[in-house]
Image (cartoon, rainbow, N blue to C red):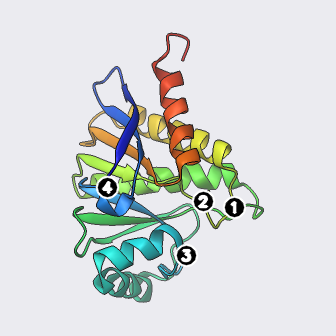
Amino acid sequence: MAQVLASYRRPDGRVLEAVRGDITEEETDVIVNAANERLAHGGGVAGAIVRRGGREIQEESDRWVREHGPVPTGEAAITGAGRLRARHVVHAVGPRWGMGDEETLLARAVRSALERADEVGARSVAIPAISTGIFGFPKADGVRIIVRAVQEYLDAHPRSAISVLRLCDRDAETAELFAETLKALASPSG
């Protein structure tokens, strides 16, 4: 069961929530998958999404790669969500730690994921701590960059339909980092 650890209402009324829970159980319009370039969803968040949502997510991802080629680091692709509660899965390819220019690429992956969500008119999005798992990005830095990229995207897209963005991770430490970051935004000096 997902647990909301912190919530931040932006001046424009849109809400960011820090959630400890399983992203595959989110009932948002879109869930974001931390993917690799070939959209081969074997482990981590990606593997969990296919196990819960069904093989059709992997099959649709394979078709996407056949038609468009691998998804470059910092970009995202979108597929259906199979048997998940979400309507769509956005597959964002974040950087591997040590590849160079990781901060820029992670921020770009978040923006690209939100662009794909906007393309399908999503009102709610759940996003994990992209790149902070098996890709090795330091958690605290990754969370900071992800939240900043979300804020910048929403600031730059006032007409975006996205009204709720859930920063979701089942890892307690990562979810708490998201919560601390949102609490800092909500404080008068944030």
| Circle on res. 37 | 3
Residue 117, which numbered label?
4
Q: Amino acid at mark 3?
A: Glu
Instruction: Give the quadrant of the C terminus.
Output: top right
63 relative position to 38: left or right? left
Among the two numbered marks 1 and 4 on one chain, the one whose residue lies closer to the N terminus: 4
Whole-angstrom CA distance, mark 3 to mark 2, is 12 Å
Characterize the local packing of mark 2: few (<14), some (14-19) or many (20 or more) Cα atoms within 10 angstroms.
many
Check disc 1 and report the residue beneath it. 136
**Vertical side of 98 occupied by 114: above or below:** above
* Distance between the alpha carbons at the discs numbered 4 and 3: 19 Å
Q: Earlier in the sequence, mark 3 or mark 2?
A: 3
Cα separation between marks 2 and 1: 6 Å
Mark 3 or 2: in front is 2
Q: Are marks 3 and 2 in contact (CB under 8 Å)?
A: no
Where is 97 relative to 54, above or below? above
**Image check: 40 left or right of 141?**
left
Q: Residue at x 54, y 53 (%)?
A: 108
Check whether the beta carbons of the residues at disc 4 and disc 3 lie within 8 A of each other.
no
Mark 3 neighbour density, 10 Å: few (under 14) some (14–19) many (20 or more) = many
Please identify the quarter of the rendering in which residue 22 is found: bottom left
Given the current orientation, which residue lies at the most extreme front position?
A: 1
Dots 2, 1 in contact, CB < 8 A: yes
Helix, strand or loop status at disc 2: loop
**Which residue lies at the image location 31% right of the left edge and 55% below the top edge?**
117
Coordinates of residue 54 in the picture (x, y in percent): 29, 81
To which residue does mark 2 refer?
131
**Given the image, on which type of amino acid does mark 1 rest?**
Gly
In primary-sequence order, the first of circles 2 and 1 is 2
Give the mark nearest the N terminus, 4 or 2: 4
Disc 4 residue type (three-letter): Ala
Please state which amino acid type lies under the numbered disc 2.
Answer: Ser
